[in-house]
Amino acid sequence: MSATRFMSLRELRNETGKIKDILSDNGKIIITNKGKPEALMLDVNEQNFEETLLLINQIRLSRAISNRMTCNHPRTKLTSQRGDSLQIQ
């Protein structure tokens, strides 16, 4: 695997046919808009798709909980994509 590949939204639109090859070579592409990261594309396959998605969801939930614990916001309800809910108080 090579270094992480950055692509602007314009490049993404113009080079759509190359995305699979770039992901195979690099494993990930960071999509930028006006030089700032907007999205992340990851190389997945049938064997690792569900595990990858689960790990991403766990990271996002962990980050949401961490953000909630460091901020003084009113009570927050977090809901996973499966519909499970977690009350944070």
Image (spheres, rainbow, N blue to C red):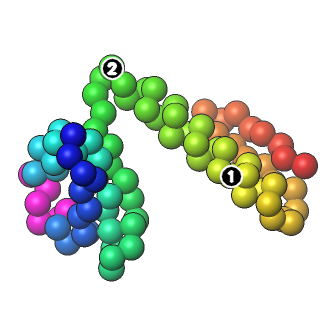
Query: In the structure shown, which secondary structural element does the residue marked by tag 2 occupy?
Result: loop
Q: Earlier in the sequence, mark 2 or mark 1?
A: 2
Q: Position of residue 81 (x, y in %)?
A: 58, 39
As drawn, is 44 to the left or to the right of 22? right
Furthest residue toward right: 89
Label 1 sits on what residue type?
Answer: Ala
Which numbered dot is residue 40?
Answer: none
Q: Position of residue 20 (x, y in %)?
A: 16, 43
Residue found 60% across the figure and 33% down from its top:
82
Q: Position of residue 5 (x, y in %)?
A: 24, 56
Furthest residue toward top: 47
Q: Is residue 2 magenta?
A: no
Residue on which disc 2 sits: 47
Residue found 9% across the figure and 51% down from its top:
17
Q: Is residue 9 visible?
A: yes
As drawn, is 78 to the left or to the right of 15? right
Whole-Å distance between the Cαs marked 2 and 1?
28 Å
Asked if the residue at tag 1 contacts the one at tag 2, i.e. Cβ–Cβ closer than 8 Å, the answer is no
Most common SS among magenta residues: helix
